Image (tube, rainbow, N blue to C red):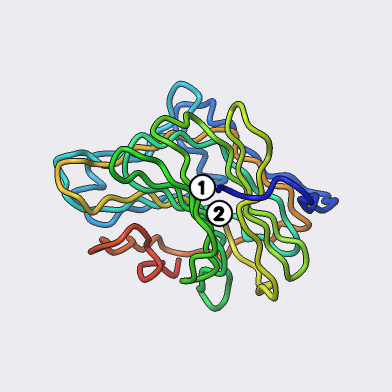
Amino acid sequence: KAADTASITPPPATPAVISDTFDGTSLDTGKWAWGASDPQLTATNPVKVENGLLKMIIPQSLSQGSVEVRSIQNITGDFDASVLADLKDGNLEFWFVGFPSGTIPFKVALYRYNSTNYIRASNGNNMLKEANLGSSPGSLTITIRRVGTQVFYLYQTATGPLTQLASSDNISTEDGNFRFIQMTNTSSIGAEIDLDNFNAKVNLVIPSPTSTITPTPTPTGGVNCDDYVNKW
């Protein structure tokens, strides 16, 4: 049984919107920065914008690796952030990372295992709920919504209703930013995700301090990257 479709808390009324439809020919560096787990992966140009999509690709020739795209702007207050994702292979995690602690208070992960796609909601290292999406779910919208100290994890397929996968209480209200992390840890498979229509309604956007991109260390097992969050 997947999840609840009833009593979904609506997004907050917010004065600012951050959005990107990835219609250009390169990543908008006024909104995003990216890094890879090692120079060999960086050299493959794993982050591309083409045909109206943000593409994150780890070649099959690399047995392990991770690519991370993060928002330049730091976010404070309530927010409703969503992105349209089409997972081809590997594992995608959509994070909100809090500062100054560098913790991962909440995230949604899409991953593929034995030809089946799954979606998982987590609070830090604690998995809250997982749903089986079937073998060919197509593109779906994944959403993280913070209202006060509550967080709601939602998704919507092309033909289904907006579904609440899970929720968390007593969540940190730290400022932070959004991150997409694509990874693989299985040889000869690689990883690929197409992203589109990122949209975040936020209470306040604050300038991000100048920082240097530090590569995310390569995962060594499992399908999450909790231990490898970099402190950009």
Residue receiving disc 2: 72
Quarter assignment of residue 87 = top left
Measured as percent of width and height from the top left, residue 23 is found at: 54, 25
Q: Amino acid at mark 2?
A: Ile
- Up the image or down, 171 lies above or below 72; here it is below
| Residue plotted at (73% across, 71% down) | 149
Camera-nearest residue between 153 and 197: 153
Determine whether label 1 and label 2 are within 8 Å by CB: yes
Measured as percent of width and height from the top left, residue 26 is found at: 44, 32
Camera-nearest residue between 72 and 119: 119
| Residue plotted at (53% across, 58% down) | 121
How far apart are the alpha carbons under marks 1 and 2? 5 Å
Q: Is residue 36 left or right of residue 98?
A: left
| Residue plotted at (30% across, 61% down) | 222
Measured as percent of width and height from the top left, residue 29 is found at: 50, 44
Question: Residue 32: which disc?
Answer: 1
Camera-nearest residue between 117 and 201: 117
- Indicate the secondary structure of the residue bearing disc 1: strand
- Indicate the secondary structure of the residue bearing disc 2: loop
| Residue plotted at (52% across, 63% down) | 122
Q: Amino acid at mark 1?
A: Trp
- Up the image or down, 41 lies above or below 75; here it is above
